[in-house]
Amino acid sequence: MSDLNFSCTQCGKCCHDLRLPLTRLEAIRWLEQGGTVEILCEAIPWVDEPAASDAPAMHKRLRSFPALSGELPIRVIVVLAASFKGACPHLLPDMRCGNYDGRPHVCRIYPAEVNPFISVIPSHKQCPAEAWASPTPFIRANQVVDAQTQLHTTLLRHGDRHDVPFKAWACAQLNIQSASLSNEGFVSHQPSRDTLLDVLRQDMPDDDATVSPTSWTVVTNQATTLDALRMVGAKSLFATVLNQESPQYLGFLADTPATEPPACKGDGGS
Ligand code: SF4
Ligand code: SF4
């Protein structure tokens, strides 16, 4: 990672049209404040265990729980995401944060990356050129310089891993059993605020700690991916079938038409 300088100009661009990853406690707070939280799910085919020396794979392993899609072993990553179109509900007219002391970790670290294997690339960020022209050191020797940013990055990563068993249990309670293929997009589940708050506030029963649903459906908008999933016996679904508000397919790639009428090998989730 190259050395970078940075200083926030308070332009407010990073407070619009977002899905912000939250810890479970942050998601409860966001919902209690009247905000919207989506549950974003992605599935990674997981046929073999990676070597312990494969740090990126081990990172994914720690963020996910094991499940099955038909005959295919998978691991499921679940992200609780505050979502809003346009301005964040906490953004003030002068572009200051109206929730400054209670803002989520991810707001406190931007434009640093949560994922330790992704470098900060200014052109991928919302910040204007002036922000990167600052004399203030931001990254030196591959490390974010600011101690508070380091602290909140660590807390967010820790929460992400710590919440995994609870998320597996919560998905079962909410009948969430569909996910995108990792790196193609997300399946977004949007239970009502009251329903989600009720589940997030519950204590997970000890004897459910290792239980996760074993019948996940992998959703894709790519015809070749659908064919590949079928070949390995996965429970699969073409994204256009999710023609409703929840669950919703959020693809990174343009749809490629299914080669045949999409077979519905599952319920598509919640
Ligand atoms: S909580 Fe504050 S910092 Fe975070 S997106 Fe909203 S206005 Fe911006
Ligand atoms: S986009 Fe960058 S410069 Fe603008 S408010 Fe957000 S962090 Fe600051």
Image (spheres, grey):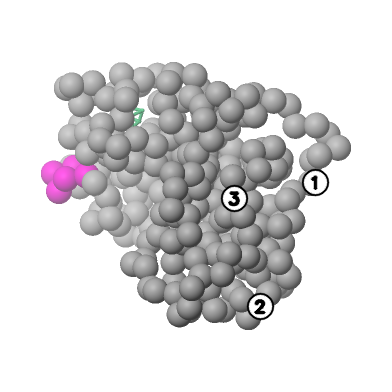
Kind of residue sitting beneath label 2: Val
The answer to whether residue 179 of the structure is visible from this angle is yes
> Measured from the top left, where is residue 42 in percent x and y?
55, 56
Kind of residue sitting beneath label 1: Thr
Instruction: Report how far apart the C-alphas of labels 3 and 1 lie in the structure.
Output: 21 Å
Q: Is residue 180 left or right of residue 95?
A: right
Instruction: Report how far apart the C-alphas of labels 1 and 2 lie in the structure.
Output: 26 Å
Residue 230 position by quadrant: bottom right
Mark 3 or 1: the one toward you:
3
> Measured from the top left, where is residue 270 in percent x and y?
59, 45
What residue does disc 2 label? 232
Q: Residues within 10 Å of mark 1 (few under 14, many from 20)?
A: few
Residue drawn where x is 66% and y is 43% of the image: 175
Which residue is more in the foreground, 151 or 47? 47
What residue does disc 1 label? 210
**Cβ of disc 3 within 8 Å of ligand 1?**
no
Residue drawn where x is 34% and y is 54% of the image: 120
If you read the primary sequence from the N terminus, does the residue marked by circle 2 or circle 3 appear first? 2
If you read the primary sequence from the N terminus, does the residue marked by circle 1 or circle 2 appear first? 1
**47 vs 41: above or below:** below
Residue drawn where x is 62% and y is 29% of the image: 200
Q: Is residue 231 left or right of residue 41?
A: right
Q: Is residue 3 left or right of residue 173?
A: left
Residue drawn where x is 61% and y is 55% of the image: 267
Q: Residue 269's mark?
A: 3
**Magenta stretch contains residue 238:** no
Q: Magenta residues?
A: 127-131
Instruction: Report how far apart the C-alphas of labels 2 and 3 lie in the structure.
Output: 20 Å
Element type at mark 2: loop
Q: Is residue 185 left or right of residue 3?
A: right
